[in-house]
Image (cartoon, rainbow, N blue to C red):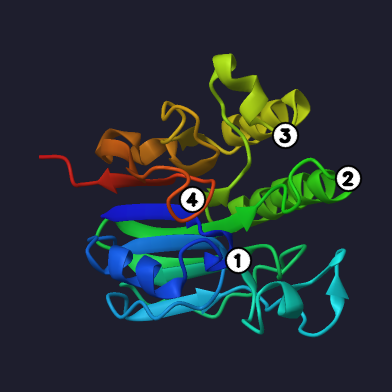
Amino acid sequence: MKIATLNIDWARKTGAKNIELFIAEKDFDILVLTEAIDLELNCFKFKYLSDQIPENVEYEGLNYTTYLGGKKAYRTIIYSKYPKINNTDFQLKDNRTSLAVEFSTELGNFVFYATIIGTQYKKLPNAKDELYNCIEDCERIYLSHKNLIVIGDLNTSFLPSEKSYSISSATTIALESLFQKLNLFNATKQIEQNIDHIIIPENINNLLIESKEFIPENIFSDHKGVFITLTHTS
């Protein structure tokens, strides 16, 4: 199973079509796009969107309709080859920034919690609120769904030598504490100069066979895309 994530910065740099053609050549089973518009990715049978950012009004300091030339803005979208398995309401703190969907896969059932922390990078109170929302959401989901995968744009490098790639040391510490508390493993931690991550349950860490960049930064946006591959043990 291949899982990937990429912040496309609203497809402003290269346009939607270039991203669509690029993704079509990949063999991802689940893809999370952040700062997204609704792309036509026919390689996926299913897609699930966070609540749309309001149109034609200023939202958190920006009129997205004007900014994106009329395109509809979604902070998180999950494209999947698997349908969601139920209609559980995960009661998230911010449905415009985060999205939680449960899938049944060949490796088991997993809840994918897709989010952004730092929608305006270090700007307060946004960055702090989004951090606390993520922590509260994940802790609540974990009470009933131990197979939790946290994925998306965390605006944080977890490598000690890359503190400048993080919102703040407090954010990094808080997220690391969350992962430890919920028995999660950061599968993309060792990818250098990377701030978008895929966090998986520790109990499937032995199924992880690769964790790589699939596109460098400054191609579609100032983020690099990363993916992991999980497989059954022999």
Whichever of callouts 4 and 2 sits on the residue coming sooner in the sequence is: 2
How packed is label 2: few (under 14 Cα within 10 Å), some, or many (20 or more)? few
Q: CA separation, marks 4 and 1?
A: 12 Å
Q: On residue 99, which mark appears? A: 1
Which element carries disc 4, helix, strand or loop?
strand
Q: CA separation, marks 1 and 2?
A: 22 Å
Asked if residue 206 lies left or right of residue 99, the reply is left
Q: Which residue is mark 3?
A: 167
Q: On residue 109, which mark appears? A: none
Q: Residue at x 87, y 74 (%)?
A: 58
Quadrant in which residue 212 is drawn: top left
Whichever of callouts 1 and 2 sits on the residue coming sooner in the sequence is: 1
Q: Foreground residue, 228 or 225?
A: 225
Circle 2: residue type: Leu
Circle 3: residue type: Ile
Give percent across and percent down for residue 17. 38, 75
